[in-house]
Image: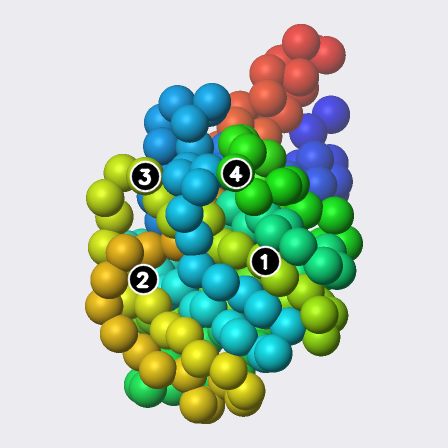
Amino acid sequence: MFTAKSFIKWLLPCLFVAPYSLLVAAPIPIYSNFNSSPVNLYNCCSGYALDGGGQRIGASFIPAVSNTLTRVNTAISHVASTDGVVISLWDDDGNGPGNIIEAWVFATLPTFGTCCTIQTMVPFGIVNLTAGQRYWLVAVANSADGNLAWNMNNIGANGTYAFGSGNIPDLIVTQGEMPAFEILGSEVPEPGTLLLSLAGLGLIGFARARRGRAGSQ
């Protein structure tokens, strides 16, 4: 028999599943300057130096639409001495990287001059990226004697990047050829989209409950 209680019992799980299913969608590119060829993703033999003296490189991107970050891919390689890199995601303070959002450490990097091993990172929590807001990906060697390179892209992509030694506020922001990286996310649905989805599920549940009641009579 169809009752309000049975309808609510059916609908409650949907209230949890529907928003999750809308958010966990197939990753979409927020920014990418990787080559479309998997065997030629980036320039194997040219890159920005990341030495153990604190040399940092920051590459910026601006999402066209609001997204939830799902994955970050970079092309950083080992040149000599100690291996290892720290890669971090920052917001923008109007003059360059502002506040750190996430950070990852890689201890084993591919050898400079080879292609196409990349570093893949996923956020530790939910990271929402706002449309029109600039963000920064910053890389620095994880050892005082490290000698690394952030490989360049090979598709001619230019943009806003930063470089320098020492502290983040001291980085020099400029325009030029971008190091190779990719940012993936899932689009954040508008509140109206969630409400429409829940309303649709409610109507489906109501129709199924009515059919069940008719079949039992």
Give me the C-alpha separation between circle 3 and circle 4: 14 Å
Apparent side of residue 139 relative to residue 80 in the rendered image (left or right): left
Classed neighbour count for the residue bearing mark 1: other residues with Cα under 10 Å, few (<14), some (14–19), many (≥20): many
**Mark 1 or 2, nearer chain start:** 2
| Tag in front: 2 or 4 | 4
Q: Can residue 32 be seen in this view?
A: no
| Tag in front: 1 or 2 | 1
Q: Looking at the image, which residue sits at the far front? A: 80
Give me the C-alpha separation between circle 1 and circle 4: 11 Å
Query: Which residue matches tag 1?
Result: 148
Residue at position x 52%, y 46% in the image: 75
Residue type, numbered disc 2:
Ile
**Mark 1 or 3, nearer chain start:** 1
Q: What element carries label 4?
A: loop
Residue type, numbered disc 4:
Gly
Residue at position x 52%, y 55% in the image: 149
Q: What element carries label 2?
A: loop
Classed neighbour count for the residue bearing mark 3: other residues with Cα under 10 Å, few (<14), some (14–19), many (≥20): some
Q: Position of residue 134 (x, y in %)?
A: 34, 70
Query: Which residue matches tag 2?
Result: 62
Give me the C-alpha separation between circle 1 and circle 3: 18 Å
Query: Which residue matches tag 4?
Result: 113
Residue at position x 58%, y 69% in the image: 51
Q: Residue 154 carries which label?
A: 3
| Tag in front: 2 or 3 | 3
Give me the C-alpha separation between circle 2 and circle 4: 30 Å
Residue nearest the viewer, comparing 199 with 212: 199
Residue type, numbered disc 3:
Asn
**Mark 3 or 4, nearer chain start:** 4
Residue nearest the viewer, comparing 112 with 92: 112
The quadrant in which the N terminus is found is top right
